Image: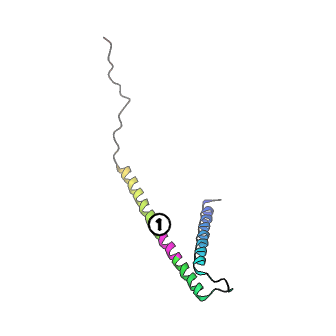
Amino acid sequence: MNLADETNARNLRDFLLLYNQLTEQCFDRCVYNFNRKDVSNRENDCVYMCADRYVAFNQKTMHIFMEQQNLKQQAAIQAATNLANTPSLPVPNLSTTTPSVSPS
């Protein structure tokens, strides 16, 4: 499986997880009458409003996440640039010989 296939599979899995969470949450909040085989107008409106709120919240969360990731990436690039532009400390030359002391 190549990288594109893995990414697509992960995206599908994330979408299905989000869809399942949305469905469960909105169903639990909105559907309360099981004596009829169809959904009432009130339940239907509640499900639409719940789904709209859930999607809007998820979009806002992802937007903020992407902004924060972008700021982190810019900070990392700036830190790497600063590190690359920092003059390095001189390295001592260990190959020079020290004067030897002769025994007297």
The residue positioned 60% from the left and 68% from the top of the image is 17
Q: Is residue 97 a member of the stretch shown in magenta?
A: no
- Is 104 drawn above or below residue 91 in the view shown? above
- Is 103 drawn above or below residue 29 in the view shown? above
Query: Residue 10 in the image: x percent, y percent?
Result: 60, 64
Query: Residue 44 in the image: x percent, y percent?
Result: 59, 85
- Is 47 drawn above or below residue 99 in the view shown? below
Q: Which residue is mark 1?
A: 65
Q: Quadrant of the N terminus?
A: bottom right
Q: Is residue 58 a member of the stretch shown in magenta?
A: yes
**Which stretch is magenta?**
54-62
Query: Residue 25 in the image: x percent, y percent?
Result: 58, 74
Structural crowding at the residue carrying mark 1, measured as other residues with C-alpha within 10 Å and reported as few (<14), some (14–19) or many (≥20):
few
Q: Nearer the viewer, residue 104 or 22?
A: 22
51 relative to 60 in the view: left or right: right
Q: Nearer the viewer, residue 68 or 100?
A: 68
The residue positioned 57% from the left and 78% from the top of the image is 29
Predominant secondary structure in magenta? Answer: helix
**Residue 28 sits in quarter:** bottom right
Query: Residue 73 in the image: x percent, y percent?
Result: 44, 60
Q: Amino acid at mark 1?
A: Phe
Q: Nearer the viewer, residue 65 or 91?
A: 65
**Residue 70 sits in quarter:** bottom left
